[in-house]
Image (cartoon, rainbow, N blue to C red):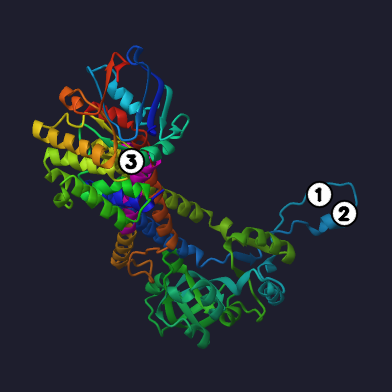
Amino acid sequence: MNFKLLYEISVSLLLARWKQTLVAAIGVTFSITMFVALLGFMTGLNDLLDGLILNRTPHIRLYNELKPKEEQPIQMAFAQKQSYHFIRSVKPSNKGLQIQGAGAMMKAIKADSRVLGVAPKIISQGFYQVGTTDLTGVINGIDVGEENRLFKFSDYVIDGNYMDLKNTPNSIILGKGAAETMLVQVGDVVQVTSTKGVKLQLKVVGFFRSGLQDIDKVQSYTNLKTAQKLLGEGNNYITDVQVKLHDILQAPAMAKEYQQLFGVEAVDIQTANSQFETGSKVRTIISFTVGITLLIVAGFGIYNILNMMIYEKMDSIAILKASGFSGRDVKAVFIGIAVSIGIFGGGLGLFCGFGLSALIDQIPFETASLPTIKTYPINYNVNFYIIGGIFSIITTYFAGYFPARKASQIDPVIIIRGK
Amino acid sequence: MEKKVLEAKNIVKYFHDPISIQVLKSVSFSLNQGEFASIIGKSGCGKSTLLYILSTMDTDFKGEVWIDGMSTSNKKEADLARIRNEKIGFVFQFHYLLNEFTVLKNVMLPGEKLGKFSKQEIEHRALEKLRILGIENEALKKPNQLSGGQKQRVAIARSLINDPIIIMGDEPTGNLDKKNSDIVFNIFKELAESYKQTLLIVTHDNEFANNTHRIIEMVDGSIVSG
C-alpha cells in the first residue's frame, strides 16, 4: 500500500472540511485536557489525604498490648489433669507495655533487606499543668532524626526548629491546639506530669500541626531520653517499634511474620487504615470513569463527522475505487483522517491538560490543618498522560473504523449509475 | 491477427430487486487492440450494465471476462482494483473530479496509486496528457474553476495517465453541449487513430456512434449486431 499517497488524500479531505475537523479535534482536546487535569487533581488530593495519615503511620507497628495472659499460671499447674478451669476476675498485669529486648529486635529488623528504616517510640499518658488545671495529653518520645527521615516529622512542625528537640535537653514540641489552650509561646516552659507521678519542667521548642485537630489538642513530642525520664524508666524502655518498608504492600505478610518471630503485637498499615485505601480507590475509579466518558463522547462526535463526510464524499470514494483504489485503501484514508484528529486533538489535549494542571497548582489553597500545603495539590504522573494519549488514539480509531468500513464497502457502480 | 484486448464470454446478469429480471442474456464479444467501438441501444437494454461488468466493478454475474489475456473470475477485490488501476481508463457521464485537489493532482492520483513511476515522472506525464487535450494551462486550477467541457477533458486525461490498454466510457458526452461533445469525440478519435488506443464507449447518441469504427447494438440484453 502506498501510505504516503493515502496520507496525502486524508490530509486533503481533512483540510477541505477543516472547520468540522477542527470541531472534532477540539472535542478530543477538551476531553483529554479534562481527563489529565481531573486525574492529576484527584490523585493529587488523594495523595495529600493519604499522606496525612499514611506518611506518618508506620507500615508495621510493633507493640505490647495491655491484656491478660492467655494462659493463667493455674492452668499450667493443672495442665496434665482432665479438668476445667473456672477463673474469675482476671486482670491484665501492669508491666505489659515495654517491649523487652527492643534494641536487639530493632537491630534484627534493620538488617532485613525489605525494611527502609526503623524508629523507636515511647507513648505515654500525662498531664500538662497550666495554672491550677491539668490538661490530659499524650507524650510521644521519639528518635528525632529517624522520625523525620521516615515519617516527615519536620513537615508538621510549624514554629521553631524540630532539631532543637534533639539538641536541647528537657524540651518538648507541643500540639498547636494544646499550646493555644495553655497560652504558651515558643521558648516558654511548661510543666508535665506523667502517670507515674514524675514532674518535669520542659522547654517548648516548637509547635506542630498534624491536620487533625483532636490530635493537636493532646499530642506532644519529646526525645526518647526525656520520655524515659518522665516515666522513671531506664534507657532501654521502648513501647513501640515503628517499621517503614520499601514496599508497602508487603506490610500485612511481614506484620504476621514479626508477630511470630518477636512475640509481640504487630499491626500493618492496611489493617489500621483500611478506610483510606478504599476512599482513594473509589476516587480514582470515579476520575477514570469521568475521563473515559468524556473521551467516548468525543469519539461519537468524530464518528458523526466522518459519517457525514463519507456521505458528502460518496462521489470521490466512487471514483477512487473506479480508478483503482481498493476498499482497503479507502478504509485507510478514513481511518487516517480519524486518527489524525485523535493525534492532533489528543496531543493538544495533553498539552492543555498539563497547562490546566499547572494552573490549578497555582491556585492558593491554605488551610489551617495542612501546614505544608500552599496551593491545590496536583499529581503530574506520566502514566495519566500516556493513558490519555493512548486512549485518544484508540477511541478515534474506533470512531473512524466503522464509517471507514462503510466507505470501503461502497459500490461505485451504484453511485456512478445514480447520476 | 490483432491482439484481443477484451473478451466477454456468455455473460448473464440478473437484477433481483424488486423482482428477478434477466438484464443480460449470454452476451459474448471481443475487442481487438486499437478498435474504437461504441455500444448503443435503448435505455434499459443493459448496455451500461455490460460496461460495468467488463470494467470489473460489478462482479455479480455469470460468465467470464478476459482483460489483456487474463480472466477476472475469482479474483480478490484488491486484485480487481489493481487491474482497473493499471489496464482500464474510465470516463463517465459525470466528471467525478475531486475538488480538494488541483487538476494536475487529479490526473496524477491513479498514477501515484500504481506507483510505477516516480512522482516527478508522473507529474511530467500528467502535464503531457493535459497538453494533448489542450488544457495544460488549467493544470494548477481547482476542478470547480473549469467549464463542463474542460472538466470532461481532465477526466479523459486522468483515464490516460497509466497508459491503459482500454478506455471505457459511459455516456462521456451525455452532459455536454454539441460543441464540447464534438471536442471530446475528436479527442477519442485522435487517441484511437494516432495512439492506437482501444476505446469502448457506451452512448445513446447515434451520431456519435456512427462516427466510431465499430457499433455494437444491443436490444433487450443481447447483442443484435456488431
Q: Nearer the viewer, residue A232 or B58?
A: B58
Q: Which of B221 and A281 is in front in this view?
A: B221
The answer, for residue A295, to whether it is visible in the render is: no
Where's residue A111, x and y in %?
69, 74
Quarter of the image holding residue A383?
bottom left
Magenta stretch: give its range. A321-348
Within 10 Å of disc 1 (Cα), the crowding (few <14, some 14-19, many 20+) is few
Where is residue A83? Give x, y as percent: 86, 47
Of discs 3 and 1, which sits in the foreground? 3
Residue, disc 3: B164
Pointer 3 chain: B
Say which residue appears at 67% left-offset and 79% top-offset: A236
Q: Indicate the amino acid at tag 2.
A: Phe
- Residue annotated with mark 2: A78
Which disc, if any, is residue A85?
A: 1
Q: Position of residue A28 (x, y in %)?
A: 31, 50
Q: Residue furthest front?
A: B1
